[in-house]
Image: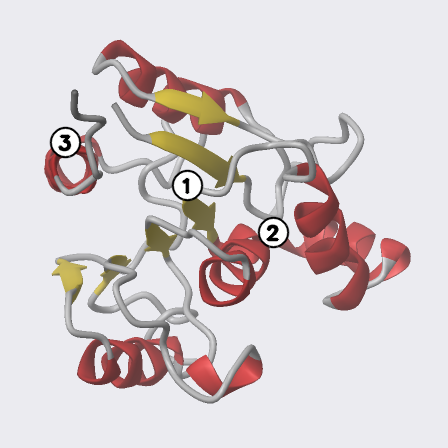
């Protein structure tokens, strides 16, 4: 099965992020959930981004994500929710052996971390079609750019205007959209596992 590193959003490693990781584990995948905020959980995006600014955003946030995978094997799928997309996308583009990228609610320009999307790294990007952050701040355009570059990448849009819609511990949670997102993610991870070279002999 696939091995995933899942980075949390700006409100921290919430129970909803932990629950999402649990869904992937129940399907047989190994999931790591690094805590970039040293146990801090925040009641709003604004509070969380304030803390991220204090520790160093985006530089230190990304660096903490990179340090979190030291000692882990190369063949990982990197996943991130919003703020967590930054380390996830960097690792998917720059760490050798990446098996895939799952980017939720956010996307940054491919050029941020390299000249082009890496060959052979599939990706999924998920966001709501009226999210004022994902759509209004231009992430959707960067997502379309990534999909246009990669040989195996998809952008999935869901009806609604919530940002953290797949976090079951927050009032922005949308169970129907999350169910579809989870189904698509599990399909992606099955495909990644099926594509893995198998030992012979």
Residue ID at (62%, 48%): 10
* Colouring convention used in this rendered image of the protein: secondary structure
In the rendered view, tell whether residue 105 sits above or below residue 34: below
Tag in front: 1 or 3? 1
Badge 2 vs badge 1, beta-carbon distance below 8 Å = no
* Residue 95 picture location, percent across and down: 54, 58
Residue named by callout 1: 75
- Which of marks 3 and 1 precedes in the sequence? 1
Decide if residue 188 is on the left or right side of residue 42. left
- Return the residue nearer the eye: 42 or 13: 13
Q: Residues within 10 Å of mark 3 (few under 14, many from 20)?
A: few
Residue named by callout 2: 45
Separation of residues labelled 2 and 3 (CA atoms): 23 Å
Residue ID at (15%, 43%): 195
Separation of residues labelled 1 and 3 (CA atoms): 26 Å
**Is residue 169 something one can see in this rendering?**
no
* Residue 49 picture location, percent across and down: 70, 57
**Is residue 96 something one can see in this rendering?**
yes
Badge 2 vs badge 3, beta-carbon distance below 8 Å = no
Q: Secondary structure at mark 3?
A: helix
Q: How many marks?
A: 3
Residue named by callout 3: 179
* Residue 34 picture location, percent across and down: 63, 32
Residue ID at (22%, 26%): 199
- Which of marks 3 and 2 precedes in the sequence? 2
Q: Secondary structure at mark 2?
A: helix
Q: Quadrant of the C terminus?
A: top left
Tag in front: 2 or 1? 1
Badge 1 vs badge 3, beta-carbon distance below 8 Å = no
* Residue 131 picture location, percent across and down: 32, 65
């Amino acid at each position: 099965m696939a091995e995933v590193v899942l980075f949390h959003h700006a409100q921290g490693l919430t129970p909803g992020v932990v629950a999402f990781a649990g869904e992937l584990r129940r399907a047989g995948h190994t999931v790591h959930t690094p805590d970039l905020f040293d146990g801090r959980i925040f009641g709003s995006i604004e509070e969380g981004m304030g803390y991220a600014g204090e520790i160093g955003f985006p530089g230190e946030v990304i660096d903490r994500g990179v340090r979190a995978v030291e000692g882990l094997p190369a063949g990982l799928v990197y996943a991130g929710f919003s703020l967590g997309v930054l380390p996830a996308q960097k690792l998917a583009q720059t760490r050798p052996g990446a098996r895939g990228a799952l980017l939720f609610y956010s996307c940054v320009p491919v050029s941020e971390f390299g000249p082009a999307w890496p060959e052979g790294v599939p990706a999924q990007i998920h966001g709501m079609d009226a999210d004022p952050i994902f759509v209004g701040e231009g992430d959707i355009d960067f997502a379309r750019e990534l999909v246009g570059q990669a040989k195996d990448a998809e952008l999935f849009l869901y009806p609604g205007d919530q940002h953290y819609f797949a976090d079951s511990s927050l009032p922005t949670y949308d169970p129907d959209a999350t169910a579809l997102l989870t189904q698509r993610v599990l399909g992606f991870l099955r495909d990644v596992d099926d594509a893995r070279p198998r030992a012979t002999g």
